[in-house]
Structures are given as structure tokens and as C-alpha cells.
Image: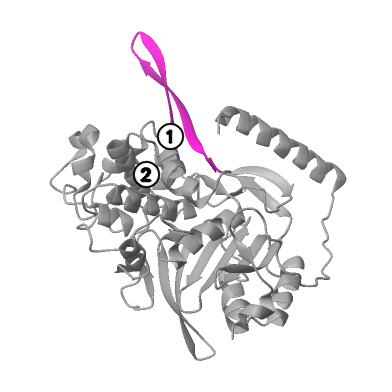
Amino acid sequence: MKTTNLLYFKQYFLQSVISMILLTGCSQTHIRDTNYNYSAPKELDDGIKTDDIKNVNIDSDKIIELTKLILKDTFPNIHSLLIARDNKIVYENYFSGKDEYWGLSLGYAKHDTNILHDIRSISKSVVSACIDIAIHQQRIKNIDDPIFTYLPDYIKFKTLQNEKITIRNLLTMSSGIKWNENLPIGSHTNNETQMERSINPVEYVLSQPMDTIPGAVWNYNSGGVQVLAEIIKSVSGDIIDKFAEKFLFKPLGIKNYKWIKSSKSAVFFHPGKIFSHRRSFPAAASGLRLTSRDLLKFGMLYLNNGRWDDKQILTEDWVNETFKTQILRENNSTIYGYSYLFWTYTETINNKTFQIVSARGLGGQRIFINKELNLIVVITAGNYRRNDIKNDGQLALDKYILPALH
């Protein structure tokens, strides 16, 4: 944890340059062996139990078929697939492919149980868990409190229009703040990009105009998550990565993680002088890197009502509320919802209805949870700049994994 971001950047920049030289100089084509025979995952010293897939009533033929399609890149650039049922991991596989370190190319990279992976907006779901912990510690009284109750350093941004924004509104993406990140990353009109480029991201978010009244409309807003991280810092004194490390990761036995800090330098010109300012903060909405097994642990925490082993890490009430739709994402639909920085939806497959709660990240990062089936599926991928992929993790779940369950 003590290695600086600069060293990380140099390390991955060098790796990226070498990869590009190799790829362009040798025109190397990566062809994978598509032969695959199932074997049960190995039990490691990480607290996760393993079992054979046949012992948990899953049709292994469907999962083998899916694996071969991933190896053929019919499901493009999948990096890992893990399936757990009845609190045991019964399928675990890793696939090499093009990857990034928060936007920096890693070239064609290897993946395995020990390698960290960008989880992008699954970081948001981790921040949500931290809010529950802060409430249980009595640092936050209630999610229906206005956010400025916990932001004394930002009170100058309080207006008649935004003063009623609550913590709940930020958790459910319904703050009412005018915000658009459905635009190309890097665009000057993309609010998330502009937030990352700003000297103070929280000031940037809170200075945006209001578009609707709080709680009325769902609108995806990564800025609200950065504000939630600032609330954690305000009430605890810990920045979000350290708070998560103390009260979430350590109890879960997660020892290896990185929460990327978005560093920004700016030079200001004033008559007669030039000065610079530098700030560094954890990118709360998208900067976390974890292993796939630790993503599985996070999913298991929710599947088991906030418990890990004999420890109650999250409150049961919080988990129950997270599994409920708090706001609809589409006004004309009752099946697509959103909860406390988790996605909720209803899926009907072969005349069977499945209630799915998922944590999602750009590029194909997914944790799918279904309580009725006692099922967790973890997928990581490297499709960060592709919006055209139809054979994605969702299709893998719908066409192969859920139909394989008995």
C-alpha cells in the first residue's frame, strides 16, 4: 500500500510501451486453445470454500460450452468467470486478454487468482457498504439527512435548490443535480471527466446546477459517490480507501487492493505571478482494483445478509434494503431499478423469473447475485471502450448460467 502512484504509473507505462512495441513490431496474434475440461476450483487460504459443480445442481455442459465460447472470443475479452452456489465456489477460470490500468493500456495481459483488476464502478457499491458501516458506528445518523449536515467545509455551496439533497438521494442516483456522463470519456462535456480534471472534485459536483427536485428522477451520477466518500472522510477522518481497509476489507480478509488516486496538477496565471496547485484523492466512483476472488467475497457478504464467517460486517437491514428497488431507472418499466449503488432488475428465462441484484463497472465488470438460487457470478473483462458488444456478461448469465441451474 505504501508504493506511490507515481511508481505505479511508471511501472504500467513501461509495461504498456513494451507491450505496444511487441505487438506492433511482431504483429503477434494471440490464439487460445479452445479445448477445455472442467475441474473443480482449488481451495485456497482465503476463507472461500470450494466444491464440484455437479454437487450444487448446475449443468456442467452448459458451463463448459460457455467456457469454450469465451476461449474463442465469441464472448470477447472476458478475463475471469467465477460461479458460486450455496456459499461454495464451483467454477473459476481466468483468460488472458487486452487490459488497462484505469485507462492506461497494459497490452495483452495475463490474469489469475492473485492479479488485481480494475473494477471501475463496482467501486460505487463498495462506497455504499462503507456508508452502512458509518451509520452502524453512529458517525452518520440517517441516510435521509441532508448531505450538508455532514459537509461543514462545503457549506458555501449550499443553495435553496440543493439544500434538500440527502444521502439517500446520492445512494440512489436521484440527487437532481444536472449531470451527464453518457458522453465520450475525455469529452469536455462529460461531467465525470470534468470532475476528475478539477482541482477539487467535491466542489465541482456541488457547484453544478440543479435539474430536478431531489428524489424525483434517476440519473447516473458518479459525482454523487465522490461526495459520499467526502462524507465518510468528514465523519471519520479517514479517506475512503483507508476507511474501507479498516472496516470492510480487513474483516473480509482482503489484503491485496489498490484504490487509484486521481492526481491532478494545475498551473494558474495571475498578473505578476504563476503558481501551481496539486491534489490527490481516491477516485471513489471508479478507482478500486481487486482480485476476482475478493469480488466474490464482497458478493457473498451481501448474499449472507452482511455476515462473513462469524462477523456481522454490514447490518442485515441495509442488505435487505439494498436488495429492494429504491427507484426505477425507466419510468415506463417496472423491471429495471436501482438501489443503494447497486442495479436491480427482473429477468424471465424459460418462463422462470429471476430477481437479480448486480454491481457493475465499465468494461464488463460484474457481480450478479440471486438470493433465491443462492447464486453469485463474478465476471471481469477488458472492454472499456466498447459499447457495441452483445455477447457480454449479461448474455452469459441469461443464456448459459441461469439455464444451467436445477
Gap in angstroms between the C-alphas marked 2 and 1: 10 Å
Quadrant position of the C terminus in the picture: bottom right
In the image, residue 314 lies at what x, y percent? 38, 57
Could you say which disc has been placed on residue 183 in the image? none
- The residue depicted at 39 percent of the width and 46 percent of the height is 191
Indicate left or right for 328 with 196 as reference. left
In the image, residue 130 lies at what x, y percent? 37, 49
Most common secondary structure along the magenta stretch: strand
Residue farthest to the top, as pictured: 272
Assess whether residue 261 is covered by the magenta stretch.
yes
**What span is in magenta?**
257-281
Could you say which disc has been placed on residue 226 in the image? 2
Q: Is residue 265 above or below residue 168?
A: above
Label 1 crowd bin: few (<14), some (14–19), many (20+), radius 10 Å: many
Say what secondary structure mark 2 lies in: helix
- The residue depicted at 27 percent of the width and 63 percent of the height is 217
Q: Is residue 38 above or below residue 362?
A: below
Of residues 175 and 406, the one drawn nearer to the viewer in this rendering: 406
Q: Amino acid at mark 2?
A: Gln
Of residues 336 and 243, the one drawn nearer to the viewer in this rendering: 243
In the image, residue 180 lies at what x, y percent? 37, 53
Assess whether residue 19 is covered by the magenta stretch.
no
Q: Which residue is mark 1?
A: 281
In the image, residue 47 lies at what x, y percent? 58, 57
- The residue depicted at 28 percent of the width and 39 percent of the height is 235
Q: How is the image coloured?
A: one colour
Residue 189 visible somewhere in the drawing? no
